[in-house]
Image: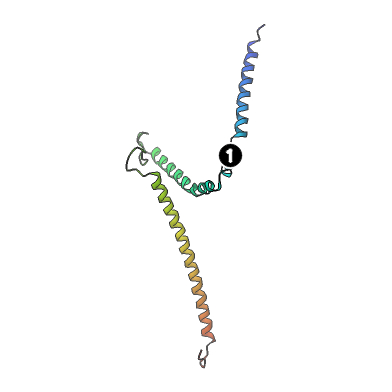
Amino acid sequence: MEKPLWYRWARVYAVGFGIIGFGFLLYNNIVPTDEELISRLSPELRAQYEKEKGLRRREQEELIKIVKQTSASNDPIWKTGPIKSPFEHGGEQLADVKQRYEKEMAEKKQMGEIERIRAELEEAQSKTKLETEEQLKKRTWYSWR
């Protein structure tokens, strides 16, 4: 005797939900999160990842800015505008972007160092000025020191 039609469809849906549910659970339990993946990296790769995180964030911001500019224009989608095709010569390569970013970071670090040195210099100057004023107050008209 053949089963009723609703029973066969119920089995199809139950098996489908079972497969989808099993896949969902398997995905959630097996695929590592970004933090777990980074923690499993070797120390050298982790240091490189942390060093280049700012560059990747900056590239993403630039891309979003270009996408907003492109979406605001009335040009067709295939006109890339400021985005250069990797096949076109004369465009800025990733190495150039990376060098420019590293140069900017070095300049920021250098400016921070200069500010720190200026602060130390001002502190030393004010300290010597106070010491000089104290020495002048101690002097009398008969002092030969």
Residue nearest the viewer, comparing 8 with 35 = 35
Q: Would residue 62 appear left or right of 138 to someone viewing this image?
A: left
**Residue 73 location (% of width, % of height):** 37, 38
Count of number-bearing discs: 1
Q: Mark 1 — residue?
A: 33
**Residue 99 location (% of width, % of height):** 41, 50
- Disc 1 crowd rating (10 Å Cα; few below 14, some 14-19, many 20+) is few
Direction bottom: furthest residue: 142
Identify the image quadrant of the N terminus: top right
Task: Name the amino acid, label 1.
Answer: Thr
Residue appearing at x 63%, y 11% in the figure: 5
Direction right: furthest residue: 1
Residue nearest the viewer, comparing 74 with 97 = 97
Q: In which quarter of the image is residue 28?
A: top right
Residue appearing at x 61%, y 17% in the figure: 12
- Per the image, label 1 sits on a secondary structure element best described as loop
**Residue 26 location (% of width, % of height):** 62, 30
Q: Is 87 situated above or below 96? A: above
Give the colour scheme shown. rainbow
Q: Is 110 situated above or below 24? A: below
Q: In which quarter of the image is residue 85?
A: top left
Residue appearing at x 51%, y 81% in the figure: 133
Residue appearing at x 49%, y 74% in the figure: 125
Q: In which quarter of the image is residue 64?
A: top left
